[in-house]
Amino acid sequence: MALPKPLSILRRTRVLEGEIDEFMDNLSQSALAFKRAVKIFMAEGRSTEFEEKLAQVNRLESRTDDLRRGIERQLYTQTLIPESRGDVLGLLENLDSILNLFQGTLWGFFIEDPDVPEELHGDYEALVEQATSAVEAIVLASRAFFRNISAVGDHMHKVMFYEKEADKVSTKLKRRIFSSDMDLARKCHLRHFVEMIDNIADRSEDVGDRLAIYTIKRRF
Amino acid sequence: MDVATLFFLSSGLFLGWSLGANDAANVFGTAVGSRMIRFTTAATICSVFVILGAVMSGAGAAHTLGRLGAIDTLGGAFMAALAAALAVYLMTKAGLPVSTTQAIVGAIVGWNLFSVTDTDPTTLSTILSTWLICPLLAAIFAVALYKLTRWFLRRVNFHMLRLDAYTRVALVLAGAFGAYSLGANNIANVMGVFVPSSPFKDITLFGAAGLTSVQQLFLLGGLAIAVGVLTYSERVMLTVGGGLLPLSPVAAWVVVMAHSMVLFLFASRGLQGFLLSLDLPTIPLVPVSSSQAVVGAVLGIGLLQGGRTIRWRVVGSVSLGWVFTPVVAGIVCYIGLFFLQNVFGQPV
């Protein structure tokens, strides 16, 4: 039986809220899976466990794509949040691009199998730690954007902090790579992975900058 | 009713139509303009509640307008309503915001001057003072309601989507209240001048419920307003959003509520009786301008936000409209009455 209009609006809203929450959960889980996958790679190389993590990130990426498309379609077909839907659309697409970076980097590790010297493992893991922390902070800021607009700023400054920390670690790591006696091809290969991981933190900061503007626009 | 009577009433119906076309935007403009509510939903709710307000609560404000100038011939009433409608048309054409209330008051004063009838200074000053009090009161209501709503929303922290859903429901309810208040308060502008010369007779249905001649007149005026809403208000609604100040949907709700409360206050006989019973000063039952109430409410919010986003040029042209409208209506009425009496030989 069809619900009366105000009730059906509230029911639809609740379903959509759940989908946005699931989108954020998936991004957060991808960050955790990515961190774990790089750790495994450093310890065991392309092991079965690493492949399982890669598969997990692939599944999350695919599900998140579906969620994003569904949310965007509903926002436009049901003309929900007409004032903010363009901003929400931009936010979800940018967050989704971070998940794509996780997936792309892990595929890079899987296909190219970089030969990382043991003395650099700690630096790579530290870089991953900073990058995923930036992602965690942007996920919290994005959740606040939907649920508690005044709390967005509480998380936003952390995104900037972790991005700068990631920059410091990546610069240090690149210096170490290029001051070593490895051949140039290997150095360039290792630098490529440093940049891929650092790019995750950079993208989080970009999303943070946009989110700051969306937040100003949404203030009552 | 004969054809001549219907012809004389036509100017009031035209004024009603233009009021519906223009003032429905004050009630539902922001909601429809920002696509929070579909036009068909807004127009249907607006039409139904305007008619209800006009028939059930329209008498109070009409009575005051009658005291300003009891136009006792259909010809005079026809020309007063036509002059007001023409003033509304001319001012709209000139791109100035216009109030039907001010137009009809100007036209009645024009009739008083032509018919050498004294204008009751007490009634006139009451009406003129409400033109200042109305936007001021709307601004005060808007500021209070805005602060209260902001305080509430900061505590409950609704999800953005849930807030959107609640805002839609609230906009529909506020719009219905606004339309009822608009009908109750502004029907006097449309049909008030015809009250002393009403061509209708009281009807009693099933021995109990019935419609007085004035209520029938107001029903007709309410229908004219509803036709204006349904046929022509969509364009006005779609262009009204962000005229003075860009508003969020929640702020738009605050504006509609403040506007509706002011119109209701100036039309409610129940409230007047309640205040009288408590020996408190009463609020005069006067037709006030729906547009002025909205402008007051929007300015109130704008000033609360620091005034930086207010488009003062638009505010200037609004103020200019407030001065010109009654003057233009009065002059048009005076000239029109001269022609009606001396060229067409009609008693005015």
Image: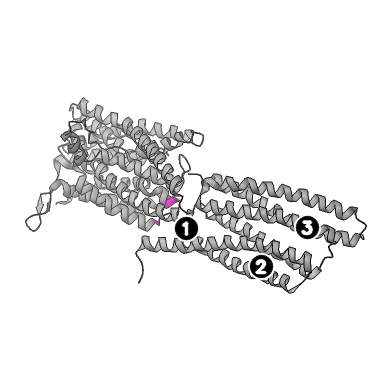
- Read off the residue under disc 1: A80
**Residue B7 appears in the picture as rendered:** no
Quarter where residue B270 is shown:
top left
What's the residue at 19%, 48% (across, down)? B56
Q: For residue B36: magenta?
A: yes
Disc 3, SS:
helix
Q: Residues within 10 Å of mark 1 (few under 14, many from 20)?
A: many
Where is residue B275 drawn, in percent x and y? 20, 35
Disc 1, SS:
loop
Where is residue A4 drawn, in percent x and y? 34, 64
For this rendering, which residue is in front, B137 or A207?
A207
- Taking the view exactly as shown, the residue that stands out farthest to the bottom is A48
For this rendering, which residue is in front, B165 or B201?
B165
Where is residue B173 drawn, in percent x and y? 33, 51
Whole-number angstrom distance, CA of label 3 to CA of label 1: 43 Å
What's the residue at 65%, 49% (across, down)? A159
Q: Quadrant of the C terminus of chain B?
A: top left
For this rendering, which residue is in front, B94 or A60?
A60
Choose the circle earlier in sequence order: 1 or 2. 2
**Residue B118 appears in the picture as rendered:** yes
For residue B172, above or below residue B141: below
- Read off the residue under disc 3: A124
Q: Is residue B21 left or right of residue B220?
A: right
Foreground label between 3 and 2? 3
For residue B186, above or below residue B48: above
Marks 3 and 2 belong to one chain: yes
Q: Residues within 10 Å of mark 3 (few under 14, many from 20)?
A: many
Q: Residues within 10 Å of mark 2 (few under 14, many from 20)?
A: many
Foreground label between 3 and 1? 3
Magenta-colored span: B32-38
For this rendering, which residue is in front, B88 or B116?
B88
- Read off the residue under disc 2: A57
